[in-house]
Amino acid sequence: MGIAALISLGSVLVLFPAWLPQGENSAMEDGAVELLQVALLSASAAFLLASSSHAGRFKPIYRALSFAAMAAAVGEIQPVLRTFAPPHLTRFFIVPFLAVTLYYLVRYKRETLRFAALASRHPASGFIAAALILIYVFSRFFGSHAFWEATLETTDYPPELPSICRGYLELVSCYFILVGVIGFCMPMRHRDNSLS
């Protein structure tokens, strides 16, 4: 029942921006997609940080993953950050979060390797892997103008179509990350030091 509820919630959440009233441009829809991506990544970071206190020996790893999720959320709000800071500096805002992530992973190498071994057998890893494939393969593929020109055999298509596809695929991947994170955090309620 829980899995069915999560799938239903995800379907509504991912399609929500498409239900917004359309104006002359799709800025509202694009903003809603970006906002939902940030919200999902922030929720993932919050789940990981809250679960770290119950994760036993994997406490630093959960903290590292929470900072990685924060870095991803900061990366998604770069267009907003450009209104407050010079554009060439905004790409460096994620560096502190990545530095903390790297510190925890390197400082606790044994726990990192053990977590990787256990996580590779955990069902939640499938959601995380699917999210990464969506971001780094499908969103690049379906978000390219060349794909739509070749598929539709014309250059006469809405110019915003590739960016819309890329945005929605990234939104689905952020939801998959949240579901995967919840999967990793749920066992922490029952027993420490175990992901299996």
Image: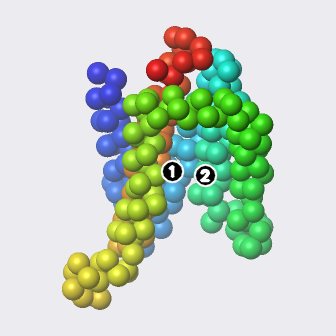
Residue on which the image places disc 1: 37
- For the residue pair 38 and 75, the one nearer the viewer reads as 75
Which amino acid type is marked by label 2? Ala
Above/below status of 74 relative to 139:
above
Going by the image, does 111 lie left or right of 96?
A: left
Quarter assignment of residue 168: bottom left
Q: Element under label 2?
A: helix
User: x and y percent of residue 27 in the render?
Assistant: 48, 67
Instruction: Look at the image and tell me in which quarter the N terminus lies.
Output: top left
- Residue 175 visible in the displayed image: no
Check the image and report above or below for 13 versus 150. above
Q: How many labels were placed on the picture?
A: 2
Residue 69 at x, y percent in the picture: 61, 44
Residue 125 lies in quadrant: top left
Q: How is the image coloured?
A: rainbow
- Under circle 1, the secondary element is helix
Towards the viewer: 195 or 40 = 195
Give the side of residue 95 with respect to residue 148, left or right. Answer: right
Residue located 37% across and 62% down the image = 138
Against 80, residue 100 (above or below) is: above
Quickly name the residue at label 2: 72
Q: Please state which amino acid type lies under the numbered disc 1.
A: Gln
Crowding at mark 2 (Cα within 10 Å: few <14, some 14-19, many 20+): many
